[in-house]
Amino acid sequence: MTDLRSTQEPATAQHIAAWLTKLGQLVRKGPGDGSDQQCGLYAEMLLRDGLPKAAYRLDSLRYVAEQTEWWPSYANLRVWVDEHWSSTKRNARDNRVLQIAGPAPKRLDGIDLQWRNYWTRGEMTNWVRDGEHDVSPHEAEARRRNALSLIRSMSPSAYEAITGHPAYEAADQALWADVPSLRRIIARLTAKPFAPLVRILHAAVKRHAPGNLAIVEEAFPETAK
């Protein structure tokens, strides 16, 4: 007898290992990172942690790749996969509840889904940022309010999915074309830089007001690469 889960569930283990190999094609790697041996060991540990095969799909692959430029440690990878799977389950549950009450809501995708995932991650970590061990309840609540305010401005659909209430009456994406409003958002992100928000801002302006993209790339040169 062996205690290796990968020998008991070979199909799932192979699926996870293939998913990890694809991740290695999306991030930078150091010596030995993403090797067949390491992917096999990661797959074994992920199997033991109990997430289903469905947690390892292209959307979760994209989510993890967006969190880091380099091949992740097992601990970080496990957190990010769990965050995405929890968000996926929550979206499915919310959709089922709303379908009982009325018409099915629009499924979040693209930038809206990224904002929803950002909120989910903040709630799960109590708004503790990378490099921090803890934050006071007052600071966590302040970050929570600021995050919800940003989401309301940048993604009314995600705001509605999170709160159950419309962000604005007749909300639209004209915000990105309004240079003073855009510069105020940039100033807030410059004061408290957070890479995922900067990427989402860049994507939103590129999509809805490409003429203002130079303003974002001037403030955050890394987004122009």
Image (cartoon, helix red, strand yellow):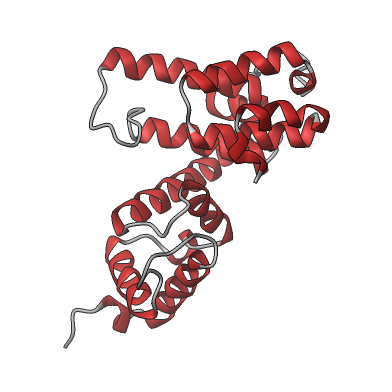
Residue at x 35%, y 32% (from the top left corner): 129
Q: How many marks?
A: 0
Residue 102 drawn above or below residue 114: above
Residue at x 49%, y 22% (from the top left corner): 147
Q: Where residue 188 sits in the image (x, y, percent)?
A: 54, 17
* Quadrant in the picture for the N terminus: bottom left
Q: Nearer the viewer, residue 214 or 90?
A: 214
Residue at x 54%, y 67% (from the top left corner): 25
Residue 73 drawn above or below residue 143: below
Q: Nearer the viewer, residue 1 or 143?
A: 143
Q: Nearer the viewer, residue 193 or 101?
A: 193
Residue 11 drawn above or below residue 115: below
Q: Where residue 157 sits in the image (x, y, percent)?
A: 66, 29
Q: Is residue 55 left or right of residue 130?
A: right
Farthest bottom residue? 1
Q: Is residue 105 visible?
A: no
Q: Is residue 182 left or right of residue 25?
A: right
Farthest right residue? 211
Q: Is residue 167 visible?
A: yes
Residue at x 45%, y 35% (from the top left corner): 120
Q: Is residue 8 left or right of residue 175?
A: left
Q: Is residue 76 left or right of residue 211?
A: left
Q: Where residue 6 sits in the image (x, y, percent)?
A: 31, 79
Q: Where residue 177 sits in the image (x, y, percent)?
A: 80, 21
Which corner quadrant of the image does residue 62 belong to? bottom right
